[in-house]
Image (tube, rainbow, N blue to C red):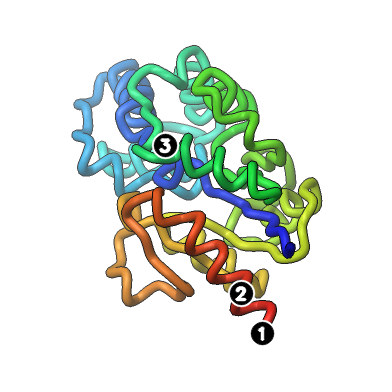
Amino acid sequence: MTAARIVFDLDGTLVDSIPSLVGAGNVLLAGLGRPEVDLATGRGFVGHGAARLVESLLVHSGGIPGELAPHVGRFREIYGADPVTGTVVYPGVREALAALAAAGHGLGVCTQKPNPPALELLRRLELMPPLTGFTGGDSLAVLKPDPAMLHHTAGQLAGDVTIMVGDSETDAETARRAGVPFLLHTEGYRNAAVAELPHVAAFADFAELPGLVSAVLGAEATA
């Protein structure tokens, strides 16, 4: 049987982490005497790494005071102290991961989130295992959509065909650059319409995912 190396994005794909990320950002803003942002606004800043998130928050609230790096460091400190509270696993994720692992597929994560909070989140939410491969925002000198992150995770997994599962424009572009099939989780943090993102299939319910993986493998086998 053909096995897949399935590489998942984290935020907006496996977990809804907007409340915890925006909460940490609001603590940072409060320390600078600035007003909070709401979840809807903060959602638009997520998905490009911690530095871009902090930059977006600061620009939105009045500009970057001094150098960006100290503010990114402060955000990492705040968020790293508790990356789990406010973050929830999307419905059906655990069952889908268990089914995929039982079918012999290799499972990994490729995320822009800094490594320590990402790994703590995955372990405390009991997603690792069955996820075994990992590439975080501190693992390489690049971030998505550079396909090196995807290849780095896939290289840790056994399997014959690489598939990426994600929720955003960045994930779709990463898969496109890597030349691998992309499965789009529609309940995440994308800004574009589903039809605007290149994908082989889209799903809202994780119960659909094992069947979609089988369909991709079937199509690859006959290509």
Asked if labels 3 and 1 touch by Cβ distance under 8 angstroms, the answer is no
Residue 180 can be seen, yes or no: yes
Residue 201 quadrant? bottom left
Which residue is labeled 1 in the image? 222
C-alpha gap between disc 1 and disc 3 = 33 Å
Q: Is residue 221 above or below residue 128?
A: below
Instruction: Indicate which label's residue lies in the foreground, 1 or 3.
Output: 1
Q: Which mark is residue 218?
A: 2
Q: Which mark is residue 15?
A: 3
Q: Position of residue 126 (x, y in %)?
A: 54, 23
Q: Position of residue 72 (x, y in %)?
A: 51, 30
Amino acid carrying mark 2 in the image: Gly
Asked if labels 2 and 1 touch by Cβ distance under 8 angstroms, the answer is yes
Residue 34 quadrant? top left
C-alpha gap between disc 3 and disc 2 = 28 Å
Of 102 and 70, which appears nearest the observer?
102
Q: Secondary structure at mark 1?
A: helix
Of 161 and 9, which appears nearest the observer?
161
**Number of numbered discs on residues:** 3
- Considering only order in the chain, which callout, 2 or 3, is on the residue closer to the N terminus? 3
Q: Is residue 60 left or right of residue 150?
A: left
Q: Quadrant of the N terminus?
A: bottom right
Amino acid carrying mark 1 in the image: Thr
Residue shown at 73%/64% (left/top)? 2
Q: Position of residue 183 (x, y in %)?
A: 48, 63
Instruction: Indicate which label's residue lies in the foreground, 3 or 2.
Output: 2
